[in-house]
């Protein structure tokens, strides 16, 4: 079997097929990799978009590295394959989608706090309560600063 014959024998929707035939990351669909350490014919690559890591030796094999199998996901609690952060693929994908939504809300003029509340909270926009697009935590910080100043003024100097 030659290398060119091997490329046609790869089953669709496997890591090898996604990386060698479709030329894209199986996790995010992009093809922009950083090259890492080499050993023999194999090389480690890392997707610059999603951070997935693979050990590849085209066209013979590809395996995802940095994964732990039969481990509980720290986010959803399901047992399966998780990355080095302890998060499963489903949650990682959902988190990426949430970050895109948050970025879009911020781009639309919401504060970061409000954007996160829209995506992860009760869905209520705080911008109506703060029409000047101020961060609601700004008020809390001001109150703390004023209380600290008041305490400093009331202190009696020791002699």
Image: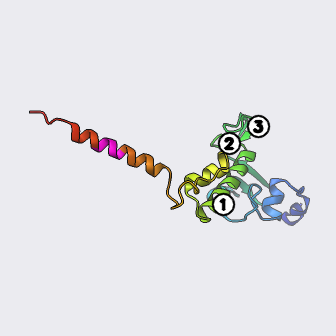
Marks counted in the figure total 3
Residue 66 shown left or right of residue 80 in the figure: left
Residue 124 picture location, percent across and down: 65, 50
Q: Which mark is residue 24?
A: none
Q: Main SS of the magenta segment?
A: helix
Identify the residue position indicated by label 3 in the image: 80
Q: Residues within 10 Å of mark 2 (few under 14, many from 20)?
A: many
In the depicted view, which residue is nearer to us: 16 or 84? 84
For the C terminus, which image quadrant?
top left
From the viewer's side, name the closer residue of 151 and 7: 151
Name the residue rendered at 59%, 61% in the picture. 106
Give the image location of residue 151, x and y in percent.
27, 38
Q: Please, is residue 98 above or below residue 72 in the view?
A: below
Q: Which residues are magenta?
A: 145-149
- Spatial distance from mark 2 to mark 1, Cα to Cα? 17 Å
Q: Residue at x 68, y 65 (%)?
A: 32
Residue 13: quarter of image: bottom right
Residue 23 % position (x, y): 78, 65
């Amino acid at each position: 079997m030659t290398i060119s014959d091997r490329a046609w024998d790869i089953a669709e929707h496997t890591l090898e097929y996604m990386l060698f035939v479709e030329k894209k990351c199986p996790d995010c669909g992009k093809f922009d990799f950083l090259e890492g350490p080499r050993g023999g014919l194999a090389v480690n690559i890392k997707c610059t978009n999603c951070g997935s890591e693979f050990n590849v030796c085209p066209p013979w094999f590809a395996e995802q590295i940095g994964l732990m199998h039969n481990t509980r996901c720290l986010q959803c609690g399901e047992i399966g394959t998780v990355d080095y952060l302890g998060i499963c693929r489903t949650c990682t994908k959902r988190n990426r989608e949430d970050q895109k939504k948050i970025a879009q809300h911020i781009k639309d003029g919401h504060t970061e706090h409000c954007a996160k509340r829209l995506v992860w909270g009760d869905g209520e926009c705080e911008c109506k309560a703060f029409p000047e697009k101020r961060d609601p935590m700004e008020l809390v910080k001001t109150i703390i600063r004023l209380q600290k100043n008041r305490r400093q003024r009331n202190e009696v100097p020791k002699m």
